[in-house]
Amino acid sequence: MFGNKSIKVNMNVLSNGIENDVYKIDELLDSVIPMNLIDRKLISRSYAFELEELLKVSSLYELSRAIINLERKLVKLEKVVQVDLEIPNLTNFYTSLSPVLLQSLVEIHELSDSENVENHWLDAVRIAVEEELAIWQEKSISLGH
């Protein structure tokens, strides 16, 4: 038992370790690292990681649920981090998704097989996720990582 004694942490060592690691947004929300060490680079890397994970999902339903869950996590993150940090949101993703999904709807008009329709929609959502990922990977590079 430590009693009233506090444990000292070398914040420089912790901060340097954070620079090299990638965290899920859930981990940021669960305070795996101190909130005062969360910065734009860390958030950008976490968001890009979450987008990469979305691309691994193979079902339109599961992908849709994962996107909705990601959006909820981003809203929570925005509430707990410093006000001056840019927190990703899915506005650009939805803007990219709209034309891709509409084009997909036009292309599948003649398809009667519902599985093919779902695959077209899944591809459309993945394209929008890939576009969002490219944007945030660029931001991460411009922030120096």
Image (cartoon, rainbow, N blue to C red):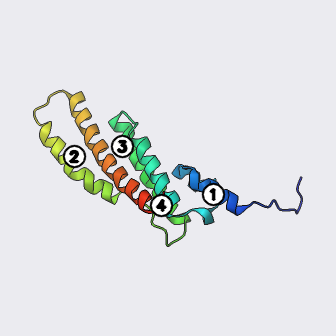
Taking the image as shown, residue 84 lies to the left or right of residue 55, namely: right
Residue 141 picture location, percent across and down:
43, 57
Q: Amino acid at mark 3?
A: Ser
Q: Are marks 4 and 1 in contact (CB under 8 Å)?
A: no
Q: CA distance from mark 1 to mark 3?
A: 35 Å
Q: Are marks 1 and 2 in contact (CB under 8 Å)?
A: no
How packed mark 3 is, by other alpha carbons closer than 10 Å (few <14, some 14-19, many 20 or more), is some
How packed mark 4 is, by other alpha carbons closer than 10 Å (few <14, some 14-19, many 20 or more), is few
Which mark sits nearer the N-terminus, 4 or 2?
A: 2
Which mark sits nearer the N-terminus, 1 or 2?
A: 1
Taking the image as shown, residue 117 lies to the left or right of residue 16, namely: left
Q: CA distance from mark 3 to mark 4?
A: 32 Å
Q: Which residue is mark 2?
A: 101
| Label 4: which secondary element | loop
Q: Which residue is mark 1?
A: 16
| Label 2: which secondary element | helix
| Label 3: which secondary element | helix
Q: Which residue is mark 3?
A: 64
